[in-house]
Amino acid sequence: MPEAPVVAFDELDSTNAEARRRAEGGEIGPLWIVAARQSAGRGRRGRAWETGEGNLAATYLFVTQKLPAEAAQVSFVAALAVADLADAFVPASLVSLKWPNDTLVAGRKAAGILVESGQGPHGSLWVAVGVGVNL
């Protein structure tokens, strides 16, 4: 992924929701959106994702010409990247992936990935790759 600027907030409802608002407003990225706290973070299937202070809540926003089904595969890449990062801080034997995109440390969920996309006003598909890590 190309280098991207970072927009940081003390608190947001959700970094993915902010990415959606920006994409629907014409932002094409690439752009990182991060928040120290999320008041309405969410995971797959609308599940709540708690992001208290000290944890990571970040979303990478970009546009692509790929079809939505192909672009959604970025969730696997993101999960692998988070697992690789965890390997740098805890013994690799403690890190595993739970299908399709959760990172586990010692059998407990430590991170999740939420990919959302939509058609932007510019005609391209926007993709928001949300990453939540319990630190």
Image (tube, rainbow, N blue to C red):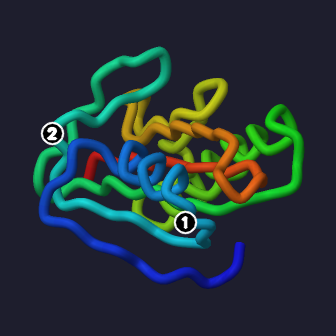
**Label 1 neighbour load within 10 Å: few <14, some 14-19, many 20+:** some
Residue 5 in the image: above or below residue 98: below
**Label 2 neighbour load within 10 Å: few <14, some 14-19, many 20+:** some
Q: Secondary structure at mark 2?
A: loop
Q: Quadrant of residue 64?
A: bottom right
Residue 1 in the image: above or below residue 107: below
**Circle 2 residue:** 39
The residue located at (22%, 34%) in the rendering is 40
Given residues 124 and 79, the one toward you in this image is 124
The disc placed on residue 55 is none
Name the residue type under label 2: Ser
Given residues 55 and 20, the one toward you in this image is 20
Name the residue type under label 1: Glu
- Image coords of residue 57 (percent x, y): 32, 53
Left or right for 47, reference 60: left
Nearer mark to the viewer, of 2 and 1: 1
Left or right for 106, reference 28: left
The residue located at (48%, 42%) in the rendering is 94
Label tally:
2
**Circle 1 residue:** 27
Q: CA distance from mark 2 to mark 1?
A: 23 Å
The residue located at (88%, 40%) in the rendering is 67
Residue 110 in the image: above or below residue 98: below
- Image coords of residue 113 (percent x, y): 52, 40
Left or right for 122, reference 70: left
Q: Secondary structure at mark 1?
A: loop
- Image coords of residue 39 (percent x, y): 15, 39
Which one is earlier in the sequence, the residue at label 2 or at label 1?
1
The residue located at (58%, 37%) in the rendering is 116
